[in-house]
Amino acid sequence: MISPELLRRYPFFGRFTEIQLKTLAMIGEEATLEDKQVVLEEGKPAQALFFLLEGGVDLYYTVEDPSLPTGLKELAVCEINVGEPFGISALIEPHILTSTCRSSGVSRVIRFDAEALHSAISEDSQLELVLLRAMSKAALQRLHATRIQLAAAWK
């Protein structure tokens, strides 16, 4: 459990009601990540949603590369910034992670258990709506950043 005050510090949580913030605070747990710690692994079930409080997290995709012994290559796609969520597959079916996330330096996060989130959402459909809108905005910003990287690499 965390304090709702912690959530109020971040614009991401600006549209949530007081009751919704308290619900999320009851579910949320602070955690510290060690440098280069794999937080989420592409292809695995999404068991939690995360929110970055301090430090950094890098997002990677795995692509095929026949020139490598494993046949796979991990590409850094973007950086998760303080105040941003990651692991949004915890909210979106089929709840399978689409990327790997690894900490870049010691970092602090809030971890929201996926089962607890789904339970809270089943009791408050407005919580789901606000949460999905906030996640959609974050996902679109991340997509835009990725497109910029692709355009730069293509030149």
Image (cartoon, rainbow, N blue to C red):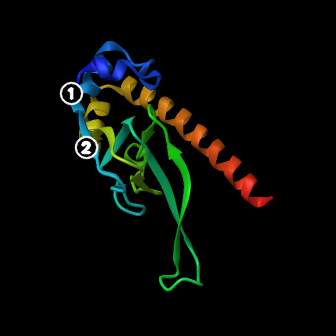
In the depicted view, which residue is nearer to us: 94 or 78?
78
Which residue type carries mark 1?
Met
Image quadrant containing the N terminus: top left
Occupied quadrant, residue 44: bottom left
Q: Residue most toward the top?
A: 18
Q: Residue most toward the left?
A: 1
The image position of residue 52, as x and y in percent, is: 39, 37
The image position of residue 120, as x and y in percent, is: 27, 31
Q: Secondary structure at mark 1?
A: helix
Occupied quadrant, residue 129: top left
Give the residue displayed 25% in from the left and 43% down from the top: 115
Q: Secondary structure at mark 2?
A: helix
State left or right for residue 33 relative to residue 86: left
Which residue type carries mark 2?
Glu
The image position of residue 88, as x and y in percent, is: 43, 44
Give the residue displayed 32% in from the left and 38% down from the top: 109
Mark linked to residue 26: 1
Q: Residue most toward the right?
A: 155
Few, some or many residues within 10 Å of mark 2 (<14, 14–19, 20+):
some
Is label 1 or label 2 in front? Answer: 1
Q: Please state the total of marks drawn on the protein image.
A: 2
